[in-house]
């Protein structure tokens, strides 16, 4: 049924498709919330290697959030052999940003599957288009944004030492990711800053100290 609907949607004008997706996303998320609780989201943003994933694991352990890493969801999509897998793989290797519709659909599905009312979303929104489409389709504003502020030198050093076999942890892609972060992702942080929604963390400190600062901010 859903496949048929998606196929028919290709024949419709884009604003109509977006309206349809928005209605369905809101309905799906609302229907799947236990006790009708409002879903709360915190965005965790920062440059590549700033320590988002490391600290999100700590946050999950201590504060009971579900952690959704947009990058992890995209890598899982590649490994699942989905029809978009090859395209996503190429984009990640180039350090570029995957089209909003793909990432948002994965996030929406994960939120529904999670069945929780508290999510930390790590590494998303990556650009202004991501932010605007997420807000219009999912229609949830973050409670606030946790911004991991870290020097480029330190981020590069961490990524080169990460050793997790990621296809984008090589010096050429790392430099591209850092450039994309400055050009496309920082404006998103600036947008939320202008709304007074950013809590900034000094992410250059050692990991245990960073987490102490996060505890202070989340309590
Ligand atoms: N505060 C820290 N000090 C030193 N090393 C750290 C710190 N936090 C994380 N690391 C290490 O740096 C590397 C990158 O950390 P992590 O994967 O958490 O970053 P990330 O922001 O999620 O990166 P990406 O955006 O590429 O997914 C890992 O090897 C991690 O162990
Ligand atoms: O919203 C997103 C998140 C990630 N990407 C792509 O994935 C890689 C890796 O992301 P990490 O957060 O570092 O795990 C990123 O460089 C992008 O290519 C994306 O397109 N959109
Ligand atoms: Mg990460």
Image (tube, helix red, strand yellow):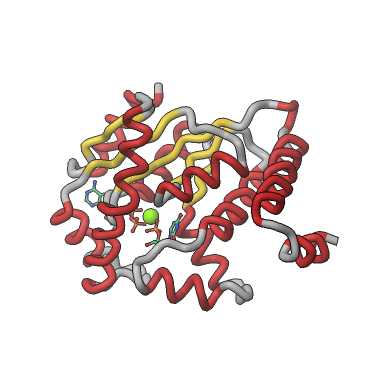
Instruction: Out of 161 and 106, give the one closest to the viewer.
Output: 106
Residue 148 in percent (x, y) is at 28, 41
Left or right position of 116 against 85: right
Residue at image x 48%, y 28%? 143
The quadrant where residue 93 appears: bottom left
Residue 137 in percent (x, y) is at 62, 44
Residue 149 in percent (x, y) is at 23, 41
Whether residue 129 is situated above or below residue 36 in the rendered picture: below
Whether residue 45 is situated above or below residue 157 in the rendered picture: above
Left or right position of 208 against 28: left
Instruction: Out of 145 and 6, give the one closest to the viewer.
Output: 6
Q: Quadrant of the N terminus?
A: bottom right
Whether residue 175 is situated above or below residue 81 in the rendered picture: above
Whether residue 13 is situated above or below residue 114 in the rendered picture: below
The quadrant where residue 134 appears: top right
Residue at the outermost right position: 1
Residue at the outermost left position: 153
Left or right position of 157 against 59: left
Residue at image x 57%, y 34%? 140
Residue at image x 38%, y 50%? 53
Where ligand 3 lies, by image quadrant? bottom left
Residue at image x 60%, y 36%? 139
Residue 162 in percent (x, y) is at 28, 64
């Amino acid at each position: 049924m859903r496949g048929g609907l998606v196929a028919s949607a290709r024949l419709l004008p884009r604003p109509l498709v977006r309206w349809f997706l928005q209605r369905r996303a809101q309905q799906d998320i609302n229907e799947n919330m236990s006790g009708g609780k409002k879903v709360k989201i915190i965005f965790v943003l920062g440059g590549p290697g700033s320590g988002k994933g490391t600290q999100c694991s700590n946050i999950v352990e201590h504060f009971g959030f579900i952690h959704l890493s947009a990058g992890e969801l995209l890598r899982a999509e590649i490994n699942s052999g989905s029809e978009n897998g090859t395209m996503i793989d190429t984009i990640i290797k180039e350090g570029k940003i995957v089209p909003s519709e793909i990432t948002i659909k994965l996030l929406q599905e994960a939120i529904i599957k999670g069945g929780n009312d508290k999510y930390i979303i790590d590494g998303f929104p990556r650009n202004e288009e991501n932010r605007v489409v997420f807000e219009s389709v999912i229609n949830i504003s973050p409670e606030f944004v946790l911004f991991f502020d870290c020097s480029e030198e330190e981020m590069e050093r961490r990524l080169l030492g990460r050793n997790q076999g990621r296809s984008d942890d090589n010096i050429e892609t790392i430099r591209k990711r850092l450039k994309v972060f400055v050009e496309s992702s920082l404006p998103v942080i600036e947008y939320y800053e202008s709304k007074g929604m950013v809590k900034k963390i000094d992410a250059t400190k050692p990991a245990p100290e960073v987490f102490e600062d996060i505890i202070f901010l989340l309590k």
